[in-house]
Every structure is written in C-alpha cells, then in structure tokens.
C-alpha cells in the first residue's frame, strides 16, 4: 500500500509534528514561538507533499504493468524550459542584498521568492498531468490565471499610478494640470482611434501601448529620482496665535471653508449679528452670553457670521503661570485658538479643550470676535 | 420524549419565567416612573404583543409542518412555484404589520426628542468609571446663579422636564436610568440630549450600558428626584460656602491630610492653605496632570450624596440605605437631605477604598497599560495612607455635606 517515497514523507511529517509539539511545549518566548510555527509549517508542507506522492505513486511504473512503456514518465514529452529558477535566483539575491541594504529590497525579494515557489510548484505539477503539453499548459492556466491576472493587474495599475504621481509632483503647480489634460486627451484620442480602426494590427496596438507604458514608467522613475517640486507649507493658526488677535486677513484665511457638513450635536452655536456675539445651546431658550463647557474633553463650537464684514471667532483659553521665572515673577501664558475669517452667512467649526476649571485660570475663558467691543461669550468650565 | 426529561425541561422553563417576576429590581424596564419612560412603555407593550402573536403563529406553523410532513418514507410531494395571490398576501401582511409598528414608533421617537419645553438643563459627562453632573447657570431648574458640580447621584426636581446634555471625556459610555427613559450613548466631542422626568420623589438606579473598560460593571448611576422645595434646599446647600473644621479636631487634621494627599486631583471648593505670613492660597486640583480622563469627582459636598466611587458603593449603612430607598415619597426628601450622618456612615467600604482603591475597583489591567497612558491613572491610585491618616480623612469628609 505504501510506496517507498510515501514512507519517507510520512516519517518526515510525523517527525515534524512531534518536533513541533515537543519544541512548542518546552520552549517559550519569541524564539520558541517562531521555531514552533516553522515546524508546524514544515509539517503542513510535508503533509501536502505526502498527499501528492500518494497520488502519483512515487511516479514509478511497476515492471509487470503491461502498459508501462506508454505510461511511464520516460514515455512522456520532456517538460519545456522554465524561467522560474532564474526568477527565484533573482529573488534570493534581492533577499541577500536587502538584508544588508534596505528592508524594501528584502521584502521585494521575499515576494519574488514566494511567487516563484507558487508558480514553479504549480507548473511542475501541471507538467505531470498528462503527456500532452497543450493540455498541461491549460491545466496550469486554469489554476493560476485567476490569481495572476488580478495580482498583475493591480501591480501594473499601482506602477502606472505611482509613476504618474511622481510626474505630477515633479511638474510645477501650473504645468501639472496642463500635463494632466494633455495625457488624458492623448489617451482618449488613442483609445478612439484604436476603437474606430478594427483592422489595425494587434501587434501595433500592443507596441504603442508598451511604448507609452514604458515612457510613463521611465519618466516617473526619472522624476522620482530628481525629487518633487518645492511645496510651500501653509501656515496653521496654532503656529501663529497673532492671527487670532485681529480680523486682518492672513495667509491661513485665503481658502478657509465657509460651510460645514456636520452641524449637529455641538456644544453650542455662536452667532455674530449686528456686532454682538451670542450663543445658542440646546435646551436653553433664546441666545445667551455665558455658556458652560466640560473640562478635559473636546467641545465643538459652530460659529456663524451674519454680519457683512468677514470676522473670526477667537477662543481665549485662559491665562496660566509657566515654570519660567523672570525678575521674581513667573511668566504668564495666554493660549489662543481661532477660526479662519468667516464671511457673511458662512459657518466654521472650532474645537476647544479646557484642561482646567475656570477657577484654575488667572483670566476668564471666553469666546470673542477680535476687535469688536462687546462681542464676547463667557465660558464657564466647572 | 422520556417523562423525566419532560419534567426537567418544564421546570427549567418555569424557573426562567419566574426569574422575570423579581420585585426587588430597581432597574426594571417594565416599571416606568416618569413621562418619557411611560411613552416607551406604552410603545413596547403593544409591539411586544404583536411580536408575540407573530411568534406564536410562525412557531405553530413550523411545528405543525415538522410533525405533519416528517419523513416517513413517503415519496417527494409535488414542488410548485409561482402562486401570485399567496405571495402578494405574504408580502402585504408583514408590510401592514411593520407599518402598524412603525407609525407609533416614529411618533414616540419624535416625542422623546423634544427639547423646546425644557425646564431644567443638566450637563452629564461620562468617564472611566463614573458620571459627573454639572448644573450650568440658568433660569431653569428654579434658577441657578452659579454652576453646581456633583457626581454619582443626579439630583433633579420632580415633575420637571429635565434635559440632560451628555458627553464623554475618554471613551463611549451609555447613560441609562431605565425607570425614567431609554439609554443614550455619550461620545467624546459630541453632545447628545436625553429628557428625564420623574413622577415622584425617590431614587432611580441606572447602569452604564456601553462596555467602557475594566470597571464598566462598576460604573453605576442614580437619579434622585426631589420635590421642588427640597430641590431648592439641595441647590442652596451645594453652593454654601466652605466651612473649615474646628481647630484641634480630628477633622482639622484630616483637612491637612486631605490637602497633602487628595487635593492634587479632588477639588473641594473653598479649601485653601494659609502661609506663615498669613497669605491665603486656594487649593486647586489639577486632575488633568494625573488622570487619563482629566477629571475626578468634586468632593465639596460628598456626604450630601449617598454613594461614592462611581455610585458603586453606598456611603450609607445597609439599614440607613434601606430607610432612604424605601421612604414614602412625602418623607423621602427630608431623609435624603440629611446626607450621611456619622451613625449611618458605611465606614467599612469607605475605609477599604481609602486603604487601596485599585484593589476594590480595578483601574488598569497592568503596569504596562499605565505606562502607555504616560503614567496617568484611570481612577484613584493606591496612596499608602496609614490607618490614622484614614481616620483623619474620614472625619474631614464627614463634614463635607
């Protein structure tokens, strides 16, 4: 019942399982865990090989079989050449280089080796399916094409997207949209021409697409190496509290949003109307000029400007003594935060957190419109 | 089915049914004690009945088919497809049932969401693992001139439409006082609303119903409904000025011990230190520097409430607690406003808490988790207080009414 090869694989499988159990029970920690996983993996792989070996009966032909001559492996066509040993060697080389160079190369090598293992294994198995090469190739396609096509498609798409993104980042801010439009137009025209000329040779279409793809990838690679254009970082309000002290337009205000998607479940809605600031709080009728907010948790405020002039809402987040002492007095700090300028009928969100109760601040917490007398809503933090 | 098995199954079913008949069930969802809970009750009874009838019909048909058409070796019956009349009927009936259920459900949801006739606003903030209640200055609640902060027990005037504005300081919690309304999640950065209204003075128990960490099960809450007059008394007491203990007493020593050990996190309004030169400095708590949530209970009037540590333990002995909980509505307010007297103090649990709080209420799973929080704790830490220090602190806290 058991062929010689099967006995070998069964013994090896048993040994791996026993080793996994013994090693797993007697060794703890990362090393023990890793080794146990390796041994379990080996056991699984050997089990698979045992099954394959059972299936092909050691690939031997009994000497007493009458049809041995026609069915023996020697009677089959020799399998064709395979590129996978070469690709596998490249993968191993990448792993070796990656270990000493960079993790990215190492990971790429691992991916190549894993792909090689799968492809080579299935190819080897399919070449034993029959004595007909074409049939064997069909078997291989049926198994691997559902895996290869989406993976290669995704990789190809990622390469194109990445290359294109490098090109767009390299080009100037003005040239980017132009290049985008030109490339898109070329693609559209090319697609239209191919579709309108069904008689055009397949090889021409493939050739043009390959040249375009290579050009895109090459340009992307060159521009990635050259680096992206200098991108100017816009100021943020937290980095420049002086912005919050007035309604003068600053760089941060240039493209400030004037509308909100989320307007519900906020702590309060503040209105600036006729030069006065007031708050609406759910459950409290009318508008108020004092609101209570919880400490140590973010509170979301909606600010709405109903007046004609653009204004901002500034939160005075208290005044506190720092640890820095000058001339016998501790330096005081008064943090601020604010919205960008809000135009008439515009809305903006302001998220504020008060770490300490009002009693812990040397100056009251408040929300104000800078430069407008009396436009104040006091904030009480109990 | 063997007779013994039948009897066992019947007994188990009967016990299961009897378990729903407990009378001492403070969180009974079928015993509304306020307008909002009554609305839910009025909705869930007919829906329960409709669902029960549907269940009975479907179960009966299934059981009949299983028995009547069980495999007895008979040939496969004829398989038919496409009976438009039957299919339309079986579509229309469930649709009508859903419409019948949906109309009162939507109507009730809108009724429960009303806020325009609010008579009192209370901010509720959840954190691991207790609830803070602050009453903002307002004309509602009978008029509140300065904010009131308390925890553990939510005190509200009876028969008033009270609007809770709920949020959270750390993770998502859920506020639920079953006898007064449904549950509502509290989410950091969002303010959700929930209307409560109690018909009669008394205490109504609740429980956080969104898993929120290690001590989720210890995150309880109680709503205390007081008559309008008693609520006014309670408010006046909450803003009463701080009274220092009499010099030379155990409580006076406790004030110093409290200041040295507890006031880094716990605020007692009015507590101050006096320097040798006579300069008075208010003692301000900074829980944001020590606690993950950035807040701990304000203890200014600890003994005016009946619970501590997230309403997990009673400050009253069992006998005194039963007296308050079971008091008739007309006597409840007076009993509650007595607060915790020395005779009624549940010193056992309070002392255990002060000895080693984390051993009584789990605060963090491991030291590694504490390290991940930058050394901040998620609740009261172990303070290594001596027994004499605990005596002093208890004496001091007993005067915080």
Image: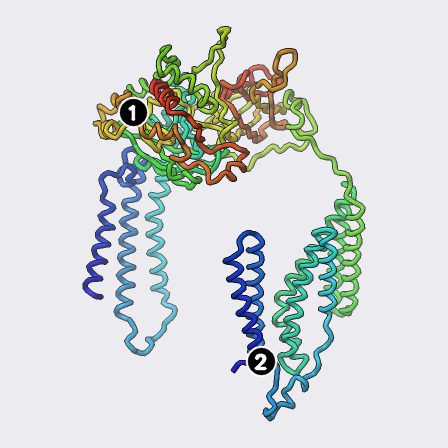
Determine which of the numbered discs, if any, sits on residue A4 in the image.
Answer: 2
Residue B298: percent from the left, percent from the top? Answer: 42, 23
Name the one closer to the observer, A196 or B288: B288
Determine which of the numbered discs, if any, sits on residue A301 in the image.
Answer: none
**Can residue B220 be seen in this snapshot?**
yes
**Can residue A287 be seen in this snapshot?**
no
Helix, strand or loop for disc 2: helix
Q: Residue at x 36, y 73 (%)?
A: B79
Q: In the figure, is residue A238 to the left or right of A165?
A: left
Which chain is mark 1 on?
A: B
- Camera-nearest label, 2 or 1: 2
Residue A359: percent from the left, percent from the top? Answer: 49, 18
Helix, strand or loop for disc 1: loop
* Picture quadrant where residue B148 is located: top left
Q: Residue at x 32, y 18 (%)?
A: B232
Q: CA distance from mark 2 to mark 1?
A: 84 Å
Q: Is residue B51 above or below residue A308?
A: below
| Residue bearing mark 1 | B345
* Picture quadrant where residue A174 is located: top right
Q: Residue at x 42, y 42 (%)?
A: B211
């Amino acid at each position: 019942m058991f062929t010689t090869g099967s006995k070998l694989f069964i013994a090896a499988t048993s040994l791996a399982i026993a080793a996994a159990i013994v090693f797993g029970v007697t060794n703890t920690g990362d090393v023990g865990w890793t080794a146990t996983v390796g041994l379990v993996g080996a056991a699984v792989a050997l089990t698979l090989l045992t099954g394959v070996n059972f299936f092909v009966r050691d690939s031997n032909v009994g000497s007493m079989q009458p049809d041995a001559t026609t069915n023996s492996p020697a009677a089959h066509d020799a399998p064709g050449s395979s590129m996978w040993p070469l690709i596998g060697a490249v993968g191993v080389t990448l792993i070796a280089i990656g270990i000493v160079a960079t993790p990215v190369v190492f990971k790429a090598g691992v991916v190549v080796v894993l792909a090689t293992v799968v492809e080579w294994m299935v190819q080897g198995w399919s070449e034993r399916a029959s004595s007909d090469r074409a049939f064997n190739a069909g078997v291989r396609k049926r198994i691997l094409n559902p895996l290869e096509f989406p993976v290669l498609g995704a990789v190809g798409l990622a390469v194109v997207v990445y290359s294109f993104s490098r090109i767009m980042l390299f080009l100037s801010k003005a040239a980017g949209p132009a290049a985008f439009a030109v490339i898109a137009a070329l693609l559209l025209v090319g697609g239209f021409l191919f579709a309108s000329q069904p008689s055009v040779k397949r090889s021409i279409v493939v050739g043009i697409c390959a040249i375009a793809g290579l050009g895109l990838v090459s340009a992307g690679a060159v521009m990635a190496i050259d680096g992206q254009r200098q991108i100017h970082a816009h100021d943020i309000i937290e980095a420049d509290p002086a912005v919050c002290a007035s309604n003068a337009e600053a760089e941060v205000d240039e493209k400030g949003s004037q509308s909100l998607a989320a307007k519900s479940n906020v702590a309060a809605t503040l209105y600036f109307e006729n030069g006065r600031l007031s708050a609406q709080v759910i459950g409290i009728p009318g508008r108020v000029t004092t609101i209570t907010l919880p400490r140590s948790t973010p509170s979301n405020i909606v600010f709405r400007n109903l007046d004609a002039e653009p204004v901002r809402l500034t939160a005075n987040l208290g005044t506190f003594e720092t640890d820095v002492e000058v001339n016998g007095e501790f330096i005081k700090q008064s943090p601020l935060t604010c919205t960008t300028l809000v135009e008439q009928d515009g809305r903006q969100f302001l998220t504020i957190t008060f770490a300490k109760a009002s009693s812990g601040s040397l100056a009251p917490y408040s929300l104000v419109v800078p430069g407008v007398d009396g436009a104040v809503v006091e904030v009480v933090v109990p | 089915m063997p007779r013994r098995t039948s009897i066992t199954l019947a007994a188990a079913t009967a016990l299961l049914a009897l378990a729903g008949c407990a009378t001492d069930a403070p969180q009974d969802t079928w015993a509304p004690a306020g307008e909002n809970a009554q609305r839910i009750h009025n909705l869930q009874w007919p829906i329960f009945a409709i669902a029960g009838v549907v269940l009975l019909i479907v179960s009966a048909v299934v059981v009949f088919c299983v028995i009547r058409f069980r495999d007895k070796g008979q040939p496969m019956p004829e398989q038919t497809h496409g009976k438009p009349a039957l299919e339309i009927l079986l579509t229309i009936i469930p649709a009508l049932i859903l419409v019948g259920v949906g109309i009162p459900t939507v109507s009730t949801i809108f009724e429960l969401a009303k806020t325009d006739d609010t008579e009192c606003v209370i901010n509720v903030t959840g954190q691991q693992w207790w609830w803070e209640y602050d009453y903002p200055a307002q004309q509602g609640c009978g008029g509140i001139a300065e904010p009131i902060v308390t925890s553990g027990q939510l005190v509200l005037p009876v028969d008033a439409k009270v609007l809770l504005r709920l949020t959270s300081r750390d993770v998502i919690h859920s506020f639920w006082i079953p006898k007064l309304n449904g549950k509502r999640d509290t989410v950091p950065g969002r303010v959700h609303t929930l209307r409560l209204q109690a018909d009669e003075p008394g205490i109504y128990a609740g429980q956080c119903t969104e898993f929120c960490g290690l001590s989720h099960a210890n995150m309880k809450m109680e709503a205390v409904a007081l008559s309008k007059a008693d609520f006014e008394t309670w408010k006046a007491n909450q803003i009463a000025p701080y009274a220092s203990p009499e010099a030379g007493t155990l409580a006076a020593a406790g004030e110093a011990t409290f200041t040295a050990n507890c006031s880094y996190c716990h605020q007692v309004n009015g507590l101050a230190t006096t320097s040798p030169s006579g300069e008075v400095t208010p003692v301000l708590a900074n829980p944001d520097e020590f606690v993950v949530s950035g807040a701990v209970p304000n203890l200014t009037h600890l003994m005016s409430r009946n619970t501590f540590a997230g309403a997990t333990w009673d400050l009253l002995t069992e006998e005194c607690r039963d007296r308050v909980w079971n008091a008739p509505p007309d006597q409840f307010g007076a009993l509650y406003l007595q607060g915790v007297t020395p005779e009624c103090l549940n010193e056992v649990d309070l002392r255990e808490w002060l000895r080693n709080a984390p051993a009584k209420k789990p605060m963090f799973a491991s030291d590694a988790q504490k390290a991940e929080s930058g050394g901040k704790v998620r609740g009261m830490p172990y303070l290594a207080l001596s027994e004499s220090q605990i005596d002093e602190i208890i004496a001091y806290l007993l005067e915080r009414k």
